[in-house]
Image (cartoon, rainbow, N blue to C red):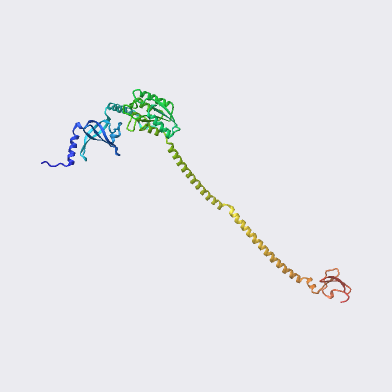
Amino acid sequence: MNEPWSVSALNRYIRSALETDYRLKDLVVAGEISNVSRPASGHLYFTLKDSSAAVKCVMWKAQAARLIYRPRDGDRVEAHGSIGVYESAGQYQLYADWIQAAGEGDLFREFAALKAKLEAEGLFDPARKRPLPGRPQRIAVVTSPTGAALRDILNVFRRRWPSLQVIVCPTPVQGADAPPQIVEALAAANRLKPDVILVARGGGSMEDLWAFNDEAVARAIAASGVPVISGVGHEIDFTLADFAADVRAPTPSAAAELATPDRAELASALADLRGRLGAALADAVRERRWALEGRAAVLRGLSPRAGLANSRQRLDDLLLRAAGAMSHRLAFDRQRADGLSHRLESLSPLAVLGRGFAVVTRAGSAAVIRAPADVAPGEALDVRVSGGKFGVVVEHK
């Protein structure tokens, strides 16, 4: 009896056997796609099935990012790749490197060849992409005048930026005659010199969108003198117009939103800026007021007014003290003068006369008679007493 195999060894052996079969290394599998899943990793997982069988399929992120066609559940597709084994689950699966809608292989090959040619010329170079204006005043829309895409675009314009002037440059967007008319509509739009040109149409199959994979259309978009937004098809659809345009939008409505600002958002931003400006202005005024008050306080400290007020008050104090001193000195001098007056009065001859004494002088002279020897009999004398003066004659001595 043979040694038992481990599950890991068995799966490894089967994987080796499958991966060494040349027929399974390069094959195309056709079937209906289901269970499409694209997690955050960017890898693409799906199942291919027919009426009686199914096979799991994986496409790694690098290959999935290059897909032009975006697979959807229920699509009939052709997937190219190789067979391998996912050992952890013990299941074989197709590792796909490209997928295309069944029956569209020739279109995809033509698309890929033209894309590679224009890309090599630098027509899709990101460096030549132009920014969109922030607040356009005129937008030209190159699209069918009867399609739903135009109605969706106009609805978005009315809601977001109602003051916008919209110029419709009508053109067929499907069929063999559409490409030259799309080119002419782009030329007409450029002659009107709008701020932005929007090229749009609704979704459809690859054949429906083929006019926007035309080389002349791609070159006309790249040569436009005005920034171009491509809004062709749905999110899963890619055309050469998308690569040639300055901006690619997933839908016509999304293109209209990319082309215009939202007035409600602008009003909210303006209100926010107004509030922030008011607050900043109030802060600035408050800071300037504080600074001014500080400088005013310094100036008040340096002002002579305070010194003058102190000097004025000191002068008043000195005047009051001088007046008091003067009054005191006058009272003192008055009292002293009174004392001197009393002393003078006490020493005055008049005071002596008042006590009964008299002053005798020669008549008509101020010479005072001091002793009897100073007079002779018969001599006239003046006698001054307290009440006045009278004359006498000496009778004898």
Q: Picture coordinates of residue 236 (x, y %)? A: 32, 32
The location of residue 363, given as percent across then percent down, is: 86, 70
Q: Residue furthest top?
A: 177
Give the camera-side residue of 175 and 229: 175
Q: How many marks?
A: 0
Residue 139 image-quadrant placement: top left
In the picture, measured across the screen, residue 19 lies left or right of residue 131, that is left
Q: Quadrant of the N terminus?
A: top left
Seen from the viewer's position, the closer of residues 125 and 349 is 125
Q: Residue farthest to the bottom?
A: 397
**Percent coordinates x, y for residue 298 in the rendering:** 54, 51
Which residue is at the front of the view, 225 or 40? 40
**Residue 14 relative to residue 283: left or right:** left
Report the residue that reaches farthest toward the front.
51
Quadrant of res 255: top left
Compared with residue 71, is residue 288 higher up or lower down, i.e. above or below? below
Tell me the quarter of the picture where residue 159 sits: top left
Residue at 43 percent of width and 38 percent of height: 264
Relative image position of residue 221 (x, y in whole percent): 37, 28
State the quadrant of the C terminus.
Answer: bottom right
In the image, taking residue 18 as reference, residue 107 lies left or right, namely right
